[in-house]
Amino acid sequence: MLVKWRPFLFAGVVLAAGCGDKGVPPVEEPVIEEVADVPSKVDLSSYFLKDGQIAHFVGEGNEFASYKARTVWHDDRHVSVYEDNGGTVMARTFRVEDERIVVVREEGEQYENYVPSDGELESLKPLYTYLQLPLKAGQSFDGWTVTDDSSSVETPLQTFDHAVVLEKIGEDGATVRSYFVDGFGEVKREFVMDNFIVSSMIERIEEPAR
């Protein structure tokens, strides 16, 4: 809570014996005025790594659960992420809007960099929503529900104390969870079907070659 101090003029005249009609100087007393907290605006672009960085994920439960994700920024609103699991490369291009992130392009077997032509990125239509504000527990979008907005998540890279957890339950009863952290993006994902679990966790971040 922000506290603002404002002087309040408190004046009184006190007559003292032998002092004639001399007045007492005004006394200033602080008045506490409550100002409501203003929530800071979330910069959704911070849910991606920097241009050229490569995140390495270690997986369990499936041979393709381990992968590396390379981030390429096209401009300040559009970014592509290339996921290489050793079997194929999936490329997704995202658009960062004020209140959400949408996927505008999704291609499998993408072994070369996507190089859009002038004006192409803005012309692409959203395919689905990737993240949407507010990232608060109980909020839902596109079948996803935010189940926790301040979760502690242990990964080989480090322990994150304030992860946002998204969860979706498929028609087959399988549960998919994604863990997002400001400044990193997705740091963990899980697929759970009965007692079968496939997970991927961030292990290290490789800086672009110079």
Image: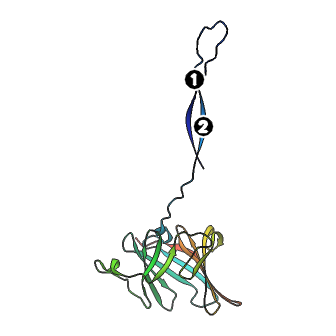
Label 1 vs 2, first from the N-terminus: 1
Task: Estimate the spatial distance between the alpha carbons at disc 1 and disc 2, rounded to whole Å.
Answer: 15 Å
What residue do we see at 48% from left, 79% from top?
129
Q: Element under label 1?
A: loop
- The image position of residue 106, as x and y in percent, is 43, 86
Query: Which residue, as the protein is rendered here, is positioned at the far right?
Result: 195
- Could you tell whether 203 is left or right of 105 in the image? right
Mark 1: few, some, or many residues within 10 Å (few <14, many ≥20)?
few
Please say which color scheme the image uses: rainbow
The residue indicated by pointer 2 is: 31
What secondary structure is found at the residue carrying circle 2?
strand
> Crowding near pointer 2: few (<14 within 10 Å), some, many (20+)?
few
Counting from the top left corner in percent of width and height, residue 111 is at: 41, 88
* Image coords of residue 183 (percent x, y): 52, 67
Amino acid identity at mark 1? Pro
Vertical arrangement, residue 89 with respect to residue 17, above or below: below
Dot 2 amino acid type: Val
Q: Nearer the viewer, residue 74 or 205?
A: 74
Residue 182 versus residue 203: which sits nearer the camera? 182
Q: Looking at the image, do the residues carrying marks 1 and 2 touch, with CB atoms under 8 Å apart?
A: no
Q: Residue furthest top?
A: 18
**Residue 59 vertical placement versus 30 (above, below):** below
Task: Count the marks.
Answer: 2
**Quadrant assignment for the C terminus:** bottom left
Residue 134 is at least partly visible in this image: yes
Instruction: Report the disc number at residue 26.
Output: 1
Disc marking residue 7:
none
